[in-house]
Amino acid sequence: MRTYDRTCLNCDAAFTTRSFSPRVAYCSIPCRFWPRVDVRGDDECWEWVGSRSQGYGQIGIGGGIGRAHRVAWLLVNELEPATFRALVLHRCHNRACCNHAHLYAGTHADNNRDMMVAGRFRNGWRPMFTDRTALEIRARYAAGGTSYRRLAAEYGRDFRVIGRLITGKTYRHLPMLGMPGF
Ligand SMILES: [Zn+2]
Ligand SMILES: [Zn+2]
């Protein structure tokens, strides 16, 4: 059978492939996989930069579509996809994250418990705006013409939550935008 000589786009190694397709441009699965992960600090989320489905990174692999975080776990731990049966779960609840330090192998029971904890967090406490929304609220208040209560109604939170955000008692890691002294 005819083979084609290629140079790996990631590691520059020479390899041969039986595929005519120029899409076969990497010598190995790790070389194809890791360039599509936004690798950051050890503690940070490493998000998949390729396509996603339901928030999960997707990669075409072994003739099918795999979830990127699962592939990350298999690669890092040198596991065989064919024999590895456990779920790969996120500690960080960021489905696109491929940082193995944020992943663990678990059971369906682990998954349900985690989703319950995450759900309680979301629905019960409602602890967080995204940073972007928090900044938006600060900027809008700083621009004038609105009030804590109006913003509270608009963003569906208690006015005290808005007040704490605007006066910097919460979201301390974000800039204050127009508050006196900043
Ligand atoms: Zn390579
Ligand atoms: Zn993460």
Image (cartoon, rainbow, N blue to C red):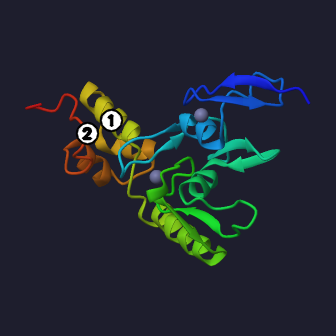
Q: Is residue 149 above or below residue 26?
A: below
Residue 100 x, y percent position in the rendering: 49, 56
- Could you tell me residue 78's position as x and y percent? 59, 59
Quarter assignment of residue 25: top right
User: What residue appears at the point 60 percent right and 70 percent down from the top-left corner?
Assistant: 111
Calculate the distance from the C-alpha at mark 1 to the C-alpha at mark 2: 7 Å
Q: Is residue 93 left or right of residue 87?
A: left
Crowd around label 1: few <14 · some 14–19 · many ≥20 (10 Å)? some
71, 175: nearer the viewer? 71
Between residues 126 and 36, which one lies in front from this camera angle? 36
- Write down the residue under mark 2: 174
Element type at marker 1? helix
- Picture residue at 19% right of the left edge, 44% below the top: 167
Taking depth in this image into account, of 175 and 96 the one nearest to the observer is 96
Check if mark 1's residue and mark 2's residue have beta carbons within 8 Å.
Answer: yes
Kindly identify the amino acid type of the residue bearing the numbered disc 1.
Answer: Leu
Q: Secondary structure at mark 2?
A: loop
Q: Which residue is mark 1?
A: 135
Amino acid found under the numbered disc labelled 2: Leu
Q: Nearer the viewer, residue 16 or 31?
A: 16
Crowding near pointer 2: few (<14 within 10 Å), some, many (20+)? some
Q: Nearer the viewer, mark 1 or mark 2?
A: 2
Q: Is residue 86 above or below residue 44?
A: below
Residue at 62% in and 78% down: 109
The reply, left or right, for residue 134 in relation to residue 53 is left
